[in-house]
């Protein structure tokens, strides 16, 4: 079990709610195509500003998935 | 439209509520002087501890604003 | 007062709720042994994924404590 | 519109002409399979030298594409 | 002469022509307000893609200016 | 020949034997789907510990493959 | 008191005496325009050499100031 | 189980045999005082040279241990 | 002798005199508990500013000590 | 053939024309003394500014040359 | 004895056997011209792939040598 | 004059007095062989500890010299 190989994919998730939600949105998208997601790492947190307010958060994540 | 120049300013926002709120406080301050804020990048997240608890969060952000 | 020496300890806190809670859990653990915690710095944010969802967040923090 | 998820792909483009051309070649290749390329980031610029001259430039880029 | 103090400002310049032109555009903007620009450092090179082609380059620069 | 475009993929290989074997396992997996692997770069070396001993090594690699 | 917002400015100070003096010169310049300087971080230490000797030190600092 | 807190300790292990052995020596030392070692990360690999040969390897590792 | 294991500890030393003194203060504190300090690495140099002057320097150091 | 050893040299090339030309100037200088230059990596791109315009570009490169 | 000056040289060593052997090959080459090699630091580990297998390892090292 | 090429050399200077003196010692050594030293950059500051005190400082510097 311990000798798995993992592949890493990189996504940017967005949300107008907050940082965790942006990450969750990225994971949900990744889960459509990849069945064996195992962990994620946050690489970068950004925000889009409109009218002096944060309109949505954008979080770049790297996600590890087990290769069969 | 695509050939804008942007200036970047760097602020540290604080909040006793959480990370997103500390960022929002920094953006609100920046919005007083700068009309055309466009995006932000989180550079560093810290917290001040008192009596074994997080008294407030401090988040360093870089904010991009359109020139002219 | 200003010439304190601080020691830095590094912990990884976890939470199924969110990033701030994972940090708080790390600080709470550190506060059991160290009386004079002063500040924290977030080094890394990760998440463990199960069934295509984030099962818990893992946040690595460095915490500064006053010596004597 | 603002809550898109993006995937990031990483390519190395080459050109004997210059740095911009190497980037363009990478983007052109990426555009064959991906319809919604949105932005690129230059990660690394290298050059292959033959007979004391730069034979071709190699530029590593990360390219963001809208999912769905 | 050697004991000047410099201030650093950070800008993002854009151009549909190329990387050097994006830098030049940032320097031109900076030169309007600051009389004593002395040097620049390229921090990041990005590009905006439309229809599978690079629509414009965006280059982040830090510019040093002599304080009187 | 010199104007190839390469795509980069990122994998984590594992082995209970050692670092080189973990890398080889990642390359072997990548070679199943990609015919034109050209080079690899080691990004990170980790180990899983059980009962005070290293149970297996985990090495993160980036692998470059020629696009036709 | 803990929910201040700070702005960060970046300067390069010089001195023919030494590193601390170069930093002090930068802080003195910053203090002319900004009333509420709170802390500094050294980013880079360089020296200018003439006739095989260090003619002056140049230290890049980031300085945090309280926004009212 | 997933909400553990981990503490990180940093060691430099040595060996005249090779890199993996230097890491194992560090883990063995750490295992004397800490019962719940879980993973390690290699931070830096160095070697001491005598008479033009590598006399021993020195590998800096960070080790994570479960706090009860 | 060459196959020692070292542990690394991280401290922040302070001084109103200068950078070297802040480092020395950190080493002196560390020497109270650890008998076999061998080397230090400066990680970060900061200063606390009061009334437009540097009130004290704060230097973060990592210190290596031989494990018996 | 594949078991060559390479030495790396670091140069800063300059040009008033552009970035590629600054790199080429560095390579040309290196080629006078070293016969077997094989590749280069761009480390840093700077520009010297006079009268609000870029007077020349300065590009720091690392160049690899085959030994023997 | 403690006030030596060291010069650092940077090499890339290769081997089809493994990482340590690639480092040893670089040190052996360096030892031909430099009599007082003292230590090395591994900067980067890469591998060249042929037919889906690692044909040889390439390790970039920085080597410190005492100046007389 | 502005289109010089510079070569960079890397040295570690030592001193029992302090950081600036360690840098000066490195520059003095470099000045014996190189006539046109122009600037230096401090890369790393370390100290050797004996009997709980800093026996000597070791500072790694990169020095730029004009190529004719």
Image (cartoon, coloured by chain):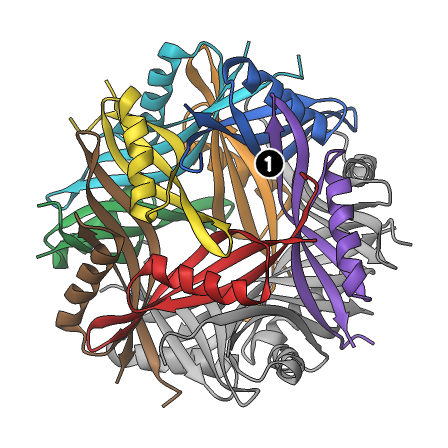
Chain colours: A green, B orange, C cyan, F brown, H yellow, I blue, K red, L purple
Indicate the chain on which mark 1 is placed: I
Residue H47: x, y in percent? 45, 49
Q: Quadrant of residue L62?
A: bottom right
Query: Which residue extends farthest front?
Result: H51
Residue L2: x, y in percent? 79, 74
**Location of mark 1 (residue):** I42
Residue occupying image coordinates x 31% and y 49%: F45
Q: Is residue L26 above or below residue B56?
A: below
| Left or right, L1 with reference to H43 | right
Q: Is residue A15 visible?
A: no
| Left or right, F25 with reference to B7 | left
From the viewer's side, name the closer residue of F26 and C28.
F26
Residue occupying image coordinates x 37% and y 17%: C30
From the viewer's side, name the closer residue of C44 and B68.
C44
Residue K47: x, y in percent? 32, 67
Identify the image quadrant of the C terminus of chain I: top left
Residue occupying image coordinates x 36% and y 44%: H42
Residue occupying image coordinates x 8% and y 45%: A1
Q: Is residue I56 visible?
A: yes
Q: Label 1 crowding class (10 Å Cα cut-off): few <14, some 14-19, many 20+? A: many
From the viewer's side, name the closer residue of A36 and A32.
A36
Identify the image quadrant of the N terminus of chain I: top left
């Amino acid at each position: 079990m311990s000798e798995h190989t993992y592949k890493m994919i990189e996504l940017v998730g967005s949300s107008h709610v907050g940082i965790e939600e942006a990450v969750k949105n990225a994971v949900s998208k990744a889960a459509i195509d990849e069945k064996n997601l195992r962990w994620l790492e946050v690489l970068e947190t950004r925000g889009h500003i409109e009218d002096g307010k944060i309109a949505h958060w954008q979080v770049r994540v790297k996600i590890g998935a087990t290769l069969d």
